[in-house]
Amino acid sequence: MITAVVTVTPHQRALVRRALGRLAPPGSLTVLGGLIGALVALWPGSLPRDVVTAAVLNGVCVAVMTAVGRALGSARPERLIISWALYALAVAVLVAGSIANTLWQNILRSDVGIAGVGSAYPAALTAAGCAGFVAVAWFGRRAAMAATAALATVVLFAMHATSAAAATDATATAADIDRAATLLTDSWVREGGVHRGAVVIAVPTGSGWVDPQATTAIRARLHDDVEFLSLPYASASSWRVFVSDRGSAATATVALLRHVLDARESLPPGVPRPRVYLYGQSLGALGADRAREWAQASHPGAVAGTVLAGVPADTVDPRGGGSSRIVFANASDPVTRWSTAAVWRPPTRPVQTRIVGARMHSPPWLPVVSFVQTSVDLLGALDGPVGTGHRYGPEQGALP
């Protein structure tokens, strides 16, 4: 009989223990972090969301919060069975949350009359959450921290690059704006627009767009006795200009309004003067309201009324004293609710706000969580029909 003796070295024992440790379930703080990330991602939003966006959000939130939990500590329950039970509970909550999120999505889709989502939706959410957790929970702590740091670096770099690009080529100079305002006003006078019943200074978005829904409705309201003047101030999308130089909209609008009022006042005595209105949507609303404030201070009563639609949160005077002002906000518009202050307090709107658009179910507000959801809703704010998100309709023609 031959007996074989196998000698296990201390180094080999350490390797075995390390391998078994990696197979053990993650620590309780790691699991709790991943669970919090899932709850943040699966909290109801205010707009329908495609499966890719929802899945990516879930995976990223779970991965980031799992990394945070792992960084805070790796304490494990004393008994292995308790640790696995905690892990199973987290998976159950993830599955239930994914199903609840899907039901909420179908409620929102029913509100706006679009097709609902099927079983693939919660399956994708669950899979993304599990993938985000596993990718971080079974790495070493250094790898988890490195992944979190890399994600933060990418986000900060993208924000810096966007701001730099917008600052270099998005907006016109003040001299260019004043020159363009002079030419536009001279053309308006020369073509007889100054003798119309009204003139509307329609402040465009950053890309120079003015909502045709608004111009058509205003024209009908004034029986076609109106001229529209619009002065572009940038050549980039509104969000880029909003980040880099939101004051450019106000600069352009004040310049144009000043020239228009001067031209109107230069008319001979007894000649009817056109009523002057201001209109702006999104970033254009900021310019229109700043011009309204300027006119109230320097030419009281010169502006007959101001219409604002889709005003970015916390960007205009909430009281709006002085000349008449109407503010329109779709019930589901995330632009009117998004601001950094929304991290810790519910969003507020100007007192003259009229809630319009489709009546959709809205989720309750939670600090931080609702800010994350509103930020993601911005991605699809223009994807729905008129009356949802950041898309407005003929109600904009309701002049004061």
Image (cartoon, rainbow, N blue to C red):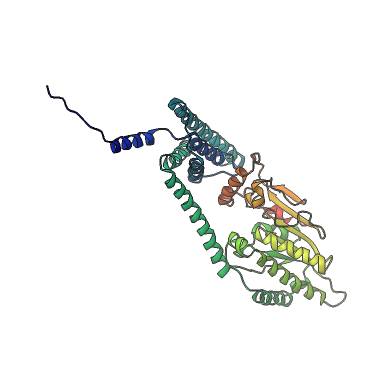
Q: Residue furthest top?
A: 1
Q: In this view, does 224 lie to the left or right of 146?
A: right
Query: In this orientation, does residue 169 appear?
Result: no
Query: In this orientation, does residue 107 appear?
Result: yes
Q: Give x and y (percent) for residue 60.
A: 49, 45
Q: Which residue lies furthest to the left in this view?
A: 1
Res. 398 image quadrant: bottom right
Q: Residue at x 55, y 33 (%)?
A: 100
Q: Is residue 275 left or right of residue 59?
A: right
Question: Between 383 and 37, which is closer to the camera in this rendering?
Answer: 37
Q: How many callouts does the rendering have? A: 0
Quadrant including the C terminus = bottom right
Q: Give x and y (percent) for residue 27.
A: 47, 35
Res. 367 image quadrant: top right
Quadrant including the N terminus = top left
Q: Is residue 269 left or right of residue 133?
A: right
Is 338 drawn above or below residue 110 in the view shown? below
Q: Which residue lies furthest to the right in this view?
A: 270
Q: Give x and y (percent) for residue 333.
A: 64, 49
Q: Give x and y (percent) for residue 175.
A: 66, 77
Q: Which residue is drawn at 31% across and 38% down?
A: 15
Question: Between 140 and 210, which is closer to the camera in this rendering?
Answer: 140
Res. 2 image quadrant: top left
Question: Between 14 and 94, which is closer to the camera in this rendering?
Answer: 14
Is 41 drawn above or below residue 349 in the view shown? above
Q: Residue at x 69, y 55 (%)?
A: 309
